[in-house]
Image: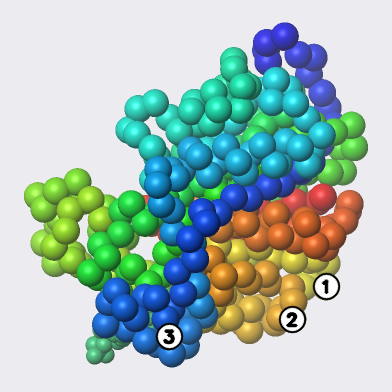
């Protein structure tokens, strides 16, 4: 049956399964000391990161994403053929064309499921989750897979200590499905951008793409970041975006089960936590183990919380992320 032929539903949307996948190689801060002029103490104190996973031997974004989505489907007790749409959030697609999502659908044996990539850098998973909620709410799509997948190691300048210590590879997926319970689903969502500041976090194809005055390590096709400017943007935007989401739903800190933020820097997340007066266990952190995995990070948190049995029906959860573009996105879900 095609998606368009399905009967429309007036219920809600719910996250029925989650999954994650990591490459096998762990790179600790001590390992990073052998690659660039840095120390475990500097990385830990400035970022909270202790290790990251780095892909080897052709472990591309689509490979990781396929494993993560397969696990999420199993978790949701769905067959690949029951998927109507797969949205892959990535800024490191295997190729420019086809979309990585098409490769994932083929790997899963889910053809002719719809497939599309979205690139909002680190905001990708939250934006894709928002889109999935909207697709399901339209009534035309019953089961939508969201997967954030990155092989950031493929766009690292491994001589640039200001970026290469931060990022890691990985993938995480969630299945968003229609439910008869209209109370369940996305209560609020936002997606924003400020493209006037794109040069603060970008990946130039060649040196000619580099605007005057922008940070540039000298190597094209690698991630460039003005860390201090992105830090300032992140500190203000993160807490403002969480506050907006809470206000939109009339939520107090006590009403929120957990905030799942993009894992960029423990200091950035800690600052938002303090300003909004959330207890430590209410803003999830796992970047000590994975580093910044861009579009995968929020999904990795979601899967860990789900696996740990920390999410229950009726819980209100806030998703929030920001990153290159510059972009930022959020949503409030009632599980
Ligand atoms: O996911 C997308 C969003 N991204 C982010 O949110 C990242 C935002 N930015 C950050 O998290 C932080 O800016 C960084 C972690 C990237 C950098 O931390 P910082 O406290 O802002 O450091 P800084 O860039 O101001 O650099 C301080 C010093 C500099 O030395 P001088 O000029 O003071 O002598 C850097 O050269 O630290 C030096 N430095 C390092 N030292 C050891 C920079 N990178 C390293 C390093 N190891 N890896």
State whether label 3 is within 8 Å of ligand 1. no
Task: Say which quadrant the N terminus sits in.
Answer: top right
Pointer 2 residue: 279
Q: Which residue is mark 3?
A: 40
Q: Secondary structure at mark 1?
A: helix
Name the side, left or right, on which 287 lies relative to 40.
right
Task: Specify whether 36 is left or right of 270.
Answer: left
Residue 322: x %, y % from top left? 48, 60
Indicate yes or no: mark 1 CB to ligand 1 under 8 Å: no
Which label sits in the foreground, 2 or 3?
3
* Residue 203 falls left or right of residue 248: left
Q: Residue at x 55, y 62 (%)?
A: 262
Q: Based on the displayed image, in which of its 4 quarters is residue 42 positioned?
A: bottom left
Query: For the point 67% across and 69% down, which residue is it?
Result: 284
Helix, strand or loop under label 2: loop
Which quadrant holds residue 108? top right
Q: Is mark 2 within 8 Å of ligand 1?
A: no
């Amino acid at each position: 049956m095609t998606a368009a032929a399905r009967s429309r539903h007036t219920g809600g949307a719910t996250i029925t399964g989650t999954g994650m996948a990591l490459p096998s190689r762990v790179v600790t801060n001590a390992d990073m000391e052998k690659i660039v002029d840095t120390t475990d103490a500097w990385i830990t104190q400035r970022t909270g990161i202790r290790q990251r996973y780095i892909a080897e031997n052709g472990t591309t974004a689509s490979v990781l994403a396929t494993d993560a989505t397969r696990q999420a489907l199993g978790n949701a007790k769905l067959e690949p053929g029951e998927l109507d749409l797969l949205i892959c959030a990535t800024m490191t697609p295997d190729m420019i064309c086809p979309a990585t999502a098409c490769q994932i659908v083929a790997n899963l044996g889910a053809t002719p499921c719809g497939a599309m990539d979205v690139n909002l850098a680190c905001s990708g998973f939250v934006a894709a989750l928002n889109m999935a909620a909207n697709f399901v709410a339209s009534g035309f799509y019953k089961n939508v897979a969201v997967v954030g997948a990155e092989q950031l190691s493929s766009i690292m300048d491994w001589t640039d200590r200001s970026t290469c210590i931060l990022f890691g590879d990985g993938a995480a997926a969630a299945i968003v499905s229609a439910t008869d319970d209209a109370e369940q689903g996305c209560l609020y969502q936002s997606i924003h951008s400020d493209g006037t500041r794109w040069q603060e976090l970008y990946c130039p194809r060649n040196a000619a793409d580099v605007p005057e005055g922008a940070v540039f390590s000298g190597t094209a096709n690698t991630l460039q970041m003005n860390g201090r400017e992105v830090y300032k943007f992140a500190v203000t935007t993160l807490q403002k975006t969480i506050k907006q989401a809470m206000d939109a739903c009339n939520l107090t800190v006590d009403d929120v089960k957990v905030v799942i933020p993009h894992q960029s820097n423990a200091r950035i997340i800690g600052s938002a936590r303090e300003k909004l007066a959330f207890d430590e266990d209410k803003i999830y952190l796992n970047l000590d183990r994975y580093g910044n995995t861009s579009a995968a990070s929020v999904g990795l948190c979601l899967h860990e919380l789900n696996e740990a049995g920390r999410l229950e029906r009726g819980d209100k959860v806030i998703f929030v992320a920001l990153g290159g573009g510059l972009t930022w996105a959020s949503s409030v879900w009632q599980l």
